[in-house]
Amino acid sequence: MPLLIRHRLVGTAMFVGIGLAILFFRLMPLAPGATALPGPEVMLCVTFAWVLRRPDHLPAIIIVAMTLIGDIMLGRPFGLFSLFVLTATELLRSWALRWGDQPFVFEWLRIAVLVALLLLGYRIVMLLFMLPVPALGPVMLQWLATTAAYPAVVVLLRLAGVRRPTAAELEMMGS
């Protein structure tokens, strides 16, 4: 098996493994009965950071499959969050090469805006279809937590070996 294909398969398998681990810990009753502040949407951070660093590792079908599993397991409206995540990741995929040479702060701000738009769009569609909508306060806190968690996720992915492709790798991918 060629090295490039093996590298992509390992990257995809790593993403799926990390995603399933995040889902597993999210479903664990770590503090039953305690009401806590909403935590970050870590899987969203992982997906966005991965797509910006290695868009070749994540085909759209893998992103959709992971978010659909999350929709089912977390009791969200089936496919709605997946649709928004897929739209956002395809937008990020098209911008990945242009953002590669910019400072991280700009990437972080763009991700913050994108997550805000994603949560706002998700909320508007839920309102249009008269689905139960969570209160605005916890959604805003989740946005803040997700935005704050993004740099830590990027650092952890970097430590795991997920980095932007070099110029030689980009040339090899193009051919």
Image (spheres, rainbow, N blue to C red):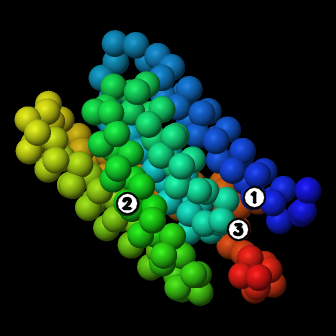
Badge 2 crowding class, 10 Å Cα cut-off, few under 14, some 14 to 19, many 20 or more, is some
Q: Secondary structure at mark 1?
A: helix
Which type of secondary structure does the marked residue at label 3 adopt?
A: loop
Residue neighbourhood size for the residue with mark 3, other residues' Cα within 10 Å, grouped as few (<14), some (14–19), many (≥20) = some
Is residue 121 shown left or right of residue 72?
A: left
- The residue labelled by disc 3 is 163
**What residue sits right under mark 2 in the picture?**
87
Rendered residue at 20%/55% (across/down): 120
Residue 151 placement (x, y as % from top left)? 53, 61
Where is residue 173, by image quadrant?
bottom right
Gap between marks 3 and 1, in whole Å? Answer: 13 Å
Q: Is residue 67 above or below residue 24?
A: below
Give the residue type that dot 1 points to: Arg
Callout 2 amino acid: Thr
Residue at 83 percent across and 65 percent down: it is 4
Residue that badge 1 annotates: 8
Question: In the structure shown, which secondary structural element does the residue marked by tag 2 occupy?
Answer: helix
For the question of whether residue 105 can be seen, the reply is: no
Which numbered disc, 3 or 1, marks the residue closer to the eye?
1
